[in-house]
Amino acid sequence: MFDSGGVVLVLSSDVVFTLQDGQLQRAWIGLGRVAPGQLASVAFDGSTYSFVTIANAVASLYQAPSRGAHPTLIATLMDPGGLPFAAAQIAPMADGIAILGTEASGSNFSTAVLGILRSGDAQFSLTRAPVGGDLTYGDGALWIVGGVMGDQVFRSVDGTSWTPTRLPVSAQYWSASAVVATKSGIAVAITSHTSSDSEVTILTSSDAGQKWQTVGTFLAPLTEFGTTIGTVFGPDGSWTAVFPDGSRVIRGGGVGSPTSATSPNGLPGNVDQIARSSQGDLVSIAGSDNCPSGKDSCTRSASVFVSSDNGQTWTEITPAP
């Protein structure tokens, strides 16, 4: 699931759904016939929908001008070392688009290639990224959050030179969410891993990550190393977090704002992701594994839930006919 400026996009195999008026609408069906390869990422920049597919060592960028319009191949990104891509992410920028291709590797240390396609360019300019992970754009810069623990944060204004960003976190083990753009700067949620609970810290910055403010903290159920408590930010910097077991929804605002907790009704466990639509609805995906014959036989299914009352009640939604 991808939250592109309030436009919630849900991927299922080669189908892309959009959330409209609390309903899932099929926007693109059978993308695999148009854009061969595994559909890896989708984004909306306010005027154009962008898709990235990966097939071995090639990531392909497709774009469509409107919902349901035929996607057109724009450019391809090839791994310079011939390594296959395990994942790819899109980040629309002010003057183009960036793709982070994380390479498949037997090592615990992720490696990645960054491609930037500026407005008017026909080909990607390629550079080696400092690490694979989550790629976003905010406050005039590209951001990557990645590493084995998800505790490495890098910033770049040109996509070529990257600067490590130090966050005010004292815990030994912690993981960061993707950096998110807000009206006043950027925000990130930190999940610190302890022996008993997870502690979530909400950080914001109004100077491109030079200084950070803590605007909220709360305890949450223990999570695995390298994972975070699902948190979504609004344009005004307000935030909402959902516990993975679906037992709690936590909300907060800016500095000094109170934090409120809700015991949600209708939200199951195994919450994987959370997003917020432009209408203010919260959207979550709850997944489950079915392993009839052991780990190698596992298949994953997921359901989409929506809340229009800030997480108090949730309703499962299915694609509209």
Image (cartoon, rainbow, N blue to C red):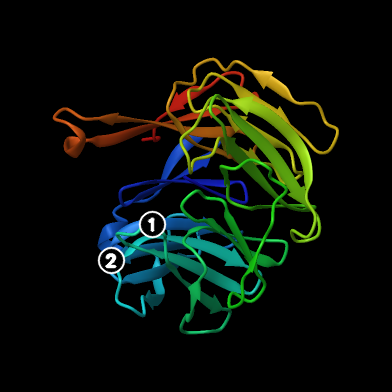
Quadrant including the C terminus: top left
Q: Secondary structure at mark 1?
A: strand
Mark 1 vs 2, N-terminal side: 1
Q: Which residue is mark 2?
A: 55
Q: Position of residue 197 (x, y in %)?
A: 57, 26
Assign a secondary structure to mark 2.
strand
Q: Amino acid at mark 1?
A: Ala
The label number, if any, that marks residue 148 in the structure image: none
Image-based side of 173 in relation to 40, left or right: right
Disc assigned to residue 40 = 1
As measured in the structure, the alpha-carbon distance from the residue carrying label 1 to the one carrying label 2 is 10 Å
Q: Position of residue 65 (x, y in %)?
A: 50, 64
Q: Residue at x 53, y 69 (%)?
A: 98
Residue 278 visible somewhere in the drawing: no
User: Is 197 drawn above or below residue 115 in the view shown?
Assistant: above
Foreground of the two, 66 or 151: 151
